[in-house]
Image: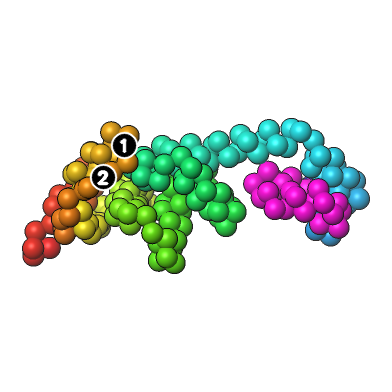
Amino acid sequence: MTQRSFQTTVARLVIDPDFRDQVRAYGAMALDGDLTALEQERVLSVVCDNGLDSTRTLHKSFRLTKIYTMLPLTRALLGPARLARELGVFWKEELPVSHYFPEEAIAFCGFLQNRLRSGLRIKYLEEVVAYERANLELRQPRTNGTSPEPQSVKFDHDPASLFTQLLSGKPPRAVPPLSCRLVGSLRQDGEVQWDFATNSQ
């Protein structure tokens, strides 16, 4: 039982920088009481080792790769500096619960959508995040073998122009207003197909 607690504590040192800083500052007082004296000594040795920071860098790189790979439009819209700030807050609030890329990316989309509801203002972000989240959720595997329900995303700006600018690597400028919806569905080949919604949809 204590071995599992020891392994959990070491893992937490890697993924939770606040906990790492507390242990560095307060020593054994910051640790849970179910560790043996020897395990506490080993944790205190690990927390001061330079290898811990290297491991944390690798861990952050792995999480960052998930976002870069799965959310290219959101990444392009936010830009490097803003993306780093938002990810810093996200990683503090949302400790990793899965090694799978889509789950991490969907969780980050949810975080950004909550930030938008709380007052974050970045032009086009609401549309882009909703689109990329829907795209990921449509591809999520289903254990019962059923096809996912179509996803509808509302746009206030022309999605074709918006996506073209983002994919070119340039910040979007003067995207024409266009009130519309895109409806995505999963095809038989596993790819997502997006269509403009008709007035009756």
**Disc 2: which residue:** 173
Looking at the picture, tell me which residue is in the foreground, 32 or 112: 112
Q: Is residue 5 visible?
A: no
Q: Is residue 101 left or right of residue 46?
A: left
Which span is picked out in magenta?
6-30
Compared with residue 186, is residue 150 higher up or lower down, i.e. above or below?
Answer: below
Percent x, y of residue 150? 23, 56
Residue 100 versus residue 164: which sits nearer the camera? 164
* Amino acid under disc 1: Lys
Question: Is residue 15 shown in magenta?
Answer: yes
Q: CA distance from mark 2 to mark 1?
A: 9 Å
What kind of residue is marked 2?
Arg
At mark 1, the secondary structure is loop
Outermost left residue? 199
Rate crowding at label 2 as few (under 14), some (14 to 19) or many (20 or more) other CA atoms within 10 Å. Answer: few
Picture coordinates of residue 188, whole percent (x, y) = 21, 42
Magenta stretch secondary structure, dominant: helix
Sort mark 1 into few (<14), some (14-19) or many (20+) by Cα contacts within 10 Å: few
Q: Which residue sits furthest bottom?
A: 118
Q: Looking at the image, what colour scheme do you see?
A: rainbow
Front one among 138 and 134:
134
Does the magenta-highlighted stretch encompass residue 25? yes
Q: Is residue 68 left or right of residue 95?
A: left
Q: Is residue 5 left or right of residue 40?
A: left
- Residue 41 lies, in percent from the top left, at 89, 45
Res 194 seen here = yes
Which residue is at 30% across, 53% downward? Answer: 124
Residue at image point 26% right, 52% down: 147
Q: Which residue is labeled 1 in the image?
A: 170
Q: Is residue 101 above or below residue 124?
A: above
Tell which residue pokes out farthest to the right in this image. Answer: 37
